[in-house]
Image (cartoon, grey):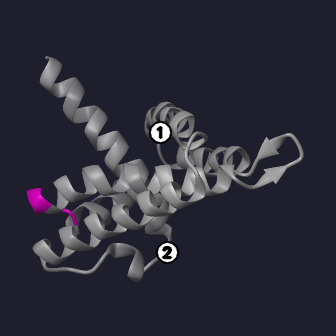
Amino acid sequence: MTKTELYAEYGSYHADPRNRLCHAFGIPLIVLGVLGLLASVRLGPVDLAIPVAILVLIYYATVSPRGALVSLVLFAALYLVAVHLSWPWSAAAFVVGWVFQLVGHRMEGNKPKFLENLTYLAIGPLYFFEETYQEITRARR
C-alpha cells in the first residue's frame, strides 16, 4: 500500500478528537515502554532497542521519508529517557500507553486498526508523529 492509502485507512479510525488526544499520549508511552524494555536486553555492546529502532526507521523511510526523519528525532529523545528506566517503569509506560489507546478507541466507537492488519502497529507511531509535525508547522505559519 502507498503512504496515502495507509494514512487514509489508518486516519479513518482516528477521526474523533478525543481518540487523537488519547493517541497523542498513548503512542509515545508505548514507544517509550518498548524502547525501555528492549534497551534492557544486551547484544554485546549494543542494546536491542537500537537495531529494532533502526529496522523500524528503515521501514518508515520506505513509507514516508519525512515521517521517518521526524520519527528518528522522537525515537532518539524517547530512547534517551528509556535507557534510564528500570524494566517495571518501561512495562508501566507500555501498559498505560495501551490503556490510552483503548480508551480513545472506545470513545470513537471502533476497534484499533491493527486488529485487522498488524502493519498498523508500526504505522501508528509514524502516522501520529508525522501528523503532529505537520500540525506544528502549520500553526507556525
Magenta part of the chain = 14-18
CA distance for labels 2 and 1: 19 Å
Disc 2 marks which amino acid? Answer: Leu
Foreground pick, 70 / 89: 89
As for residue 82 lying within the magenta part, the answer is: no
Q: Secondary structure at mark 1?
A: helix
Q: Secondary structure at mark 2?
A: loop
Foreground pick, 65 / 110: 110
Q: Is residue 89 visible?
A: yes
**Residue at figure coordinates x 13%, y 79% from the top left:** 109
Task: State which tag comes first along the sequence, 2 or 1.
Answer: 1
Report the side of 76 relative to 51 (left or right). left
Q: Is residue 21 above or below residue 104?
A: above
Disc 1 marks which amino acid? Answer: Ser
**Residue at figure coordinates x 41%, y 67% from the top left:** 95
Report the side of 7 relative to 77 (left or right). left
